[in-house]
Amino acid sequence: MFGFNAGVNEYARVGVETGVVSANPSRLIVMMYEGAIAACNMAIKHIAEQDIAGKSAALSKAIMIIESGLRLSLDKNAGGEIAESLDSLYAYMSNRLYMANLKRDIEPVEEVVRLLNDLNDAWVVLANNPVATQSARNPAAQHNTNFAKV
């Protein structure tokens, strides 16, 4: 029984790693949004269940994705005003999640999920459109698509 769960977990981990390796830069951004959204949704569940450890772990994961993934990948030189706006928005989201963690409040997490979903919708279009992805270097330059440094 334990071996089966470990095997399933390893299979899922390999699937995610394979997806990351084979993804185009726009798809990587989508994957980060999806991961942050999933972590936020888990945090909402844990807050409702009064699972403090689970809430903290889920919110920490969402904040890490936003700060170390999305925010760190911003290229403010190439992205200009759009990148600056995204940087401020990501900082706002992280702050809302910190406050949700401290106050055990669902509302700020739901707000961040709405913001992440709105951004994700736009990036899904880019990630799924090969022509847009190729020409996205200019309009989508707000994120540094060279993830070697991340």
Image: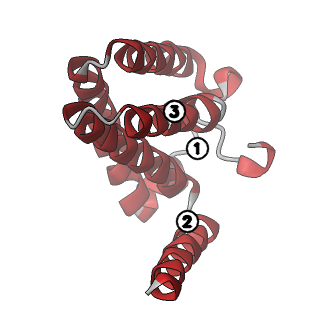
Residue type, label 2: Ala
Q: CA distance from mark 2 to mark 3?
A: 25 Å
What residue sits right under mark 1 in the picture? 137
Answer with mark 1 or mark 3, whichever residue precedes in sequence.
3
Q: Residues within 10 Å of mark 2 (few under 14, many from 20)?
A: some
Left or right placement of residue 113 versus residue 132 in this view: left
Q: Secondary structure at mark 3?
A: helix
Left or right placement of residue 20 versus residue 117 in this view: right
Q: From the viewer's side, name the closer residue of 56 and 143.
A: 56
What residue sits right under mark 3 in the picture? 60
Image: 28 above or below 14: above
Quadrant where the N terminus is found in the figure:
bottom left
- Residue occupying image coordinates x 50% and y 47%: 29
Image: 132 above or below 58: below
Residue type, label 3: Ser
Image: 145 above or below 116: below
Answer with mark 2 or mark 3, whichever residue precedes in sequence.
2
| Image coords of residue 62 (percent x, y) | 46, 36
| Image coords of residue 22 (percent x, y) | 59, 72
What residue sits right under mark 2 in the picture? 23
Residue type, label 1: Arg
Q: From the viewer's side, name the closer residue of 124 and 51.
A: 51
Answer with mark 2 or mark 1, whichever residue precedes in sequence.
2
The answer to which image quadrant residue 55 occupies is: top left
